[in-house]
Image (cartoon, rainbow, N blue to C red):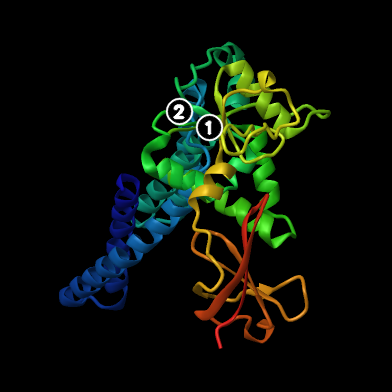
Amino acid sequence: MVYTEILRLLLVIAGTIAGKEIGASVSNSAEAQIISLVLGALVSYVLGGIIARLVDRELQTALSRLRSVPAGAIFSGSIVGTTGLLLGLALGIPAIALIHSSIVYPLVAAVAWTMAVLGSRIGVAKGRQVIRAAGLANLLDQKEPLPTGAILADSSAIMDASLEVVGKSGLLTEGIIVPSFVIEQVKTLSESPDPVKSRRAAQGLKALDSLRGEGITVTIVNHILPADHNATEEAIDMAMKLGLRLMTCSSKATVTRSPEEGEAGSALPEDALPPIINLAYLEKHLIPEHPPGERLVIDLIDEGRQPRQATGYLDGGELVVVNDASHLIGQKEIPVIVSSTRHTSQGILIFARLDS
């Protein structure tokens, strides 16, 4: 808000000066100049607010995934931010020299202010590289301790709809730890040609931002995935070494601890696993089963894998496959009747037919 209002003020000053100068060039009348000045102030007030918010939103987009700031990043952010401010002023000096108008001064100030904010945010994002380039690599060795009681999440947990629900229910008060290779894996899947995987991955990234908005600490730990290691096994190994619980939906990591389920379902021995939070088990037993005959209303958005099938999603992310409904793709609020359900590795799958 502070950045937005300061930028808006600078643009209003520029608009007011521009209105005054336009009025003076059109007429020597004092009334005409006052009217032009007022119009310039009003127009720049409206447009300045829009421009300032758009610029701030774009800067926030670049920063939204960089909430976890290492100690040295603050230092690099101040350095690069100061450099951006000086660069903005340097770019404005020729304009001041060439354009003999008082409107140039607030515009140069606006550019310098934007360059300073952008520079500080780039410095935070690229803190490690800036510190190494400045010959202060020893700052990188001063690692901050991980939050006590935090939970390490792998890619399957990030992409599961239950994660956001668990966080907003108050069960993640100590925050979650996400390895950087997990973030990269989910980002890659969000661009997958598979519509189900890409949708779940994109929702997972949004869920992390939503959890941050709820005040839950999401710590990104820089960790490179070795070329010969599986991502799930690496997450297990990290959780074991850091003494953290692992949140996952992967069958390679989960151990069924429910009395009615019986034997463990993991390929790994139980003593080689960290304490597990199994979101798949939680989802299976808490998400509504949608018994046959239940009536649902969904938007049909895509074709199914079989001829004449159409697909849509419930609010919880459950995929609904509707038989003999391909002619209704693109239409909203279509009533359907549940025929059957199936639990898969990607969540519950609902088969339905049109409600005649």
Left or right of 224, for residue 24: left
Name the residue: 70% across, 77% down.
309
Query: Is residue 112 something one can see in this rendering?
Result: no
Q: In which quarter of the image is the C terminus?
A: bottom right
- Mark 1 and mark 2 lie on one chain; the one further toward the N terminus is 2
- Look at label 2 and name its amino acid: Ser
Name the residue: 55% across, 84% down.
355
Which residue carries the number 2 mark? 78
Which residue carries the number 1 mark? 123
- Look at label 1 and name its amino acid: Gly
Mark 1 and mark 2: Cα distance apart in space: 7 Å
- Vertical position of residue 51 compared to residue 135: above or below: below
- Vertical position of residue 313 compared to residue 201: above or below: below
Q: Is mark 2 on a helix, strand or loop?
A: helix
Residue 134, percent from left and from top: 60, 19
Left or right of 209, for residue 303: right
